[in-house]
Amino acid sequence: MGSLEGFLNLDKPAGFTSHDCVAVVRRVLRTRKVGHGGTLDPAATGVLPMAVGRATRFLSFLSGDKAYRATFRLGQRSDTDDAEGQIQVGSPCPNLGREQVEQLLQEFMGEIEQVPPLYSAIKRQGKKLYQWARAGVEASELQLEPRRVVIHRLQIVQWRPGDFPEIDLEITCEPGTYIRAIARDLGEKLGCGGLMSRLRRLQSGPFRIEESLPLDLWQGSVDPTAALLPIETGFLHWDPIVLSPDGAKRWQQGQAIDLDPPYPNSETVRVLDNDGQFLGLGQRQDTLLKPLRVLLPDP
């Protein structure tokens, strides 16, 4: 089959870090060239795209919305904004109603400003935030700045009242959104505190939970390589452009080539040859097509 390459749509189990999953895939497939397409916290489950072989060179271009099923617990706070951290004193809220929460959730829709959790992998002054947090540095000392995030859907699917009400939500958002920060900020707006107690990722760009394989099932299969998806699978939602044999050869050599009209609407495109073979990703600048990432033929 040539070199071992492609994407894996894995369903990450709880208790595994994303890097743990990378280690499993490396061991099973006996290759070092493995990466993942978007970190999930150890307690979270769900879609974790994995790249093998030459697909690792395309990881940074994976795009598209992310979808989650999350549970928020109101009336409690945590230093990590989820149930895995140190639970802090909150305010029991037995009289809190679903309607009040649903109304407040509308303030989180669309483009909003969000301060990332202190326990996250964002870098500040050369170190990851969770490294500062473990060293005892407070969020106020780091002066964390809000980041722009976009939330398309935020819907309550179940409400469980009590002293510490829990809500199950379905959330669709753009990359870079921290779901546990939504729980934290919702709790602060309510004045009682909030944290995220469960998280399952249902979609990451083109990869969906319906087609994902549980990690243990995949590694125990007779032929784990059979689950490898072509690299192009990650970019089927990009507009395609077909090149002539001469244009394809020059483009694969790193040259910008002239395009014939009609031109694609988008600036980033999926590049194919006359036979429909995937050549890589390109960037259109006016009438020129420049290489973004070229899939060179095997030597």
Image: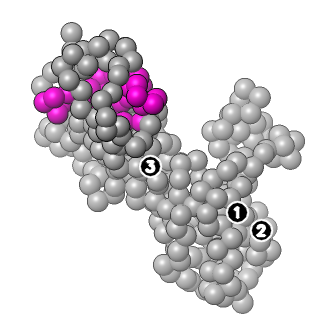
Q: Main secondary structure of the magenta part?
A: strand
Residue 297 in which image quadrant: top left
Side of 39 where 5 appears, left or right: left
Instruction: Give the residue number, with chain letter if any, for mark 3.
Output: 64
The numbered dot on residue 247 is none
Task: Identify which residue is drawn at 58% across, 64% down.
Answer: 197
> Which quadrant is the N terminus positioned in?
top left
Q: How far apart are the alpha carbons under marks 3 and 2?
A: 29 Å
Residue at horizontal 23%, vertical 36%? 230
Asked whether 135 or 266 is in front, the reply is 266
**Which mark sits nearer the N-terminus, 3 or 2?**
3
Which residue in the protein does label 2 denote? 188
Disc ID at residue 184:
1
Residue segment shown in magenta: 268-296
Amino acid at the residue labelled 2: Glu
Q: Secondary structure at mark 2?
A: helix
Q: Is residue 288 magenta?
A: yes
On the question of residue 39 being in view, the answer is yes
